[in-house]
Image: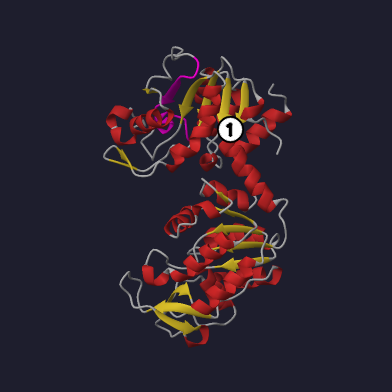
């Protein structure tokens, strides 16, 4: 992919501004999960090792714009700075006044974290004046936040237009390399696993993948719409009757194996009684909440034959133990596959964590919305501007 990469630059003595995605869960000042912080470390450490002065910016949550952080302290990045200090073994200060005065240099290998960019007026609107102010803070801008690459905002897109040099950090570059390996130059046969509640929420993903893959497994509420499309009774399960024709059209494009048995319950509840039934035996008051054991075994056989796998979404309500076996079987099959696998999306990552296969998936994406948009064929604004700057010679 044609953009400048961070490891291609001499960063010695430079002020390097890195946009990371440090949007981690924080409650009462305590970080619940620091995965995103750890994912940002390679770019930060690369810049420090090169002798750069490192400045990091990120958003956190959804604070009110143009409102001082002192009035909404729950959105402060201070806990993130403390965690970074520990992980990097250096002092990381939070700068709250970077828009009003240029921060004094802290020297080579120093690290400063700018306070939550989402409080800045014009951030979400990709305001040019704000983007230019960000650019004035650095000699090199590094976009490393894949999770926000689908948003054209001042800290992800605008700043890249005006910085002297704009490049991709290792996290962003690795994400794009992994996605391109699976989408643009995949080893065959290729499989996509797409789960979720509604066809409508992943329609473009399904449309795009149906023209690329050799097999497409659908799960969750999405599968119910496909079952209805072949005339199966889905009882009172979640499905979209207005998209039955769409499901039929997708089945005409690629092979989509249908469940032969399912796990049902009479209500959606963590204490609901789970019953295994053949598709033909589903009753009008049944809710389909997982695939059955025969279907799981069939899907596992299909997965075993693949050389490239893209996985987004569980195949059942895996959060409830009695409806988790199907997703667990799929997860184990992906883990056992010797080919290249890439997984993305919050529920998918939660399933990967639950079934302890993190180290057995070739690449786990840090982006949710960005992952989906890239898979559906959308050009990510933050990537497009890096490509444009590269084609223009960073002029």
Compared with residue 284, is residue 158 higher up or lower down, i.e. above or below? Answer: above
Tell me, yes or no, if residue 160 can be seen here.
Answer: yes
- Image coordinates for residue 163, horizontal then vertical, percent: 59, 22
Q: Quadrant of the C terminus?
A: top right
Compared with residue 388, is residue 12 higher up or lower down, i.e. above or below? Answer: above
In the image as oriented, which residue stretches furthest toward the top?
104
Residue at image position (69%, 68%) is 254
User: For the stretch drawn in magenta, what is the main secondary structure?
Assistant: loop
Compared with residue 82, is residue 296 higher up or lower down, i.e. above or below? Answer: below
In the image as oriented, which residue stretches furthest toward the bottom?
281
Quick one: SS at disc 1? loop
Q: Quadrant of the N terminus?
A: top right
Is residue 126 highlighted in magenta?
A: yes
Residue at image position (33%, 70%) is 269
- Image coordinates for residue 330, horizontal then vertical, percent: 53, 66
- Dot 1, how many residues are within 10 Å of its Cα: few (below 14), some (14-19), or many (20+)? many
Residue assigned mark 1: 169
Residue at image position (43%, 68%) is 324
Q: For residue 143, which quarter of the picture?
A: top right
Residue at image position (62%, 28%) is 6
| Magenta part of the chain | 108-127
């Amino acid at each position: 992919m044609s953009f400048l990469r961070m490891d291609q630059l001499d960063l010695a003595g430079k002020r390097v501004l890195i946009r990371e995605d440090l949007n981690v869960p924080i409650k009462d000042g305590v970080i619940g999960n620091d995965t995103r912080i750890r994912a940002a470390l390679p770019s930060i450490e690369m810049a420090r090792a090169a002798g750069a002065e490192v400045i990091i910016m990120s958003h956190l949550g959804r604070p009110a714009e143009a409102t001082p952080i002192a009035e909404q302290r729950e959105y402060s990045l201070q806990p993130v700075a403390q965690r970074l200090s520990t992980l990097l073994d250096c002092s990381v200060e939070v700068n709250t006044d970077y828009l009003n005065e240029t921060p004094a240099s802290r020297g080579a290998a120093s690290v400063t974290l700018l306070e939550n960019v989402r409080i800045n007026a014009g951030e979400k609107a990709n305001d040019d004046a704000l983007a230019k102010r960000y650019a004035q803070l650095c000699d090199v801008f590094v976009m490393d936040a894949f999770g926000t690459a689908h948003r054209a905002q001042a800290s992800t897109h605008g700043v890249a237009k005006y910085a002297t040099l704009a490049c991709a950090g290792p996290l962003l570059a690795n994400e794009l390399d992994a996605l391109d390996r699976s989408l643009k130059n995949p080893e065959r046969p290729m499989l996509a696993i797409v789960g979720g509640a509604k066809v409508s929420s992943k329609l473009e993903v399904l449309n795009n993948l149906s023209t690329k893959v050799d097999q497409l497994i659908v799960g969750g509420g999405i599968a119910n719409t496909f079952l209805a499309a072949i005339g199966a009774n889905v009882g009172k399960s979640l499905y979209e009757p207005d998209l039955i024709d769409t499901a039929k059209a997708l089945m005409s494009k690629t092979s989509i194996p249908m469940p032969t048995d399912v796990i049902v319950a009479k209500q959606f509840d963590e204490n609901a009684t789970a019953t295994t039934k053949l598709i033909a035996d589903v009753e009008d008051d049944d809710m389909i909440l997982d695939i059955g054991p025969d279907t799981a075994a069939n899907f596992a056989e299909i997965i075993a034959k693949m050389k490239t796998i893209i996985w987004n979404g569980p195949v059942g309500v895996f959060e409830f133990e009695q409806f988790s076996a199907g997703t667990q079987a799929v997860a184990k099959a992906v883990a056992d596959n010797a080919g290249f696998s890439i997984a993305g999306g919050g529920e998918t990552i939660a399933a990967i964590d639950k079934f302890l296969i993190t180290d057995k998936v070739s690449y786990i994406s840090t982006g949710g919305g960005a992952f989906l948009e890239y898979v559906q064929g959308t050009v990510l604004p933050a990537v497009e501007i890096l490509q444009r700057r590269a084609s223009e010679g960073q002029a």
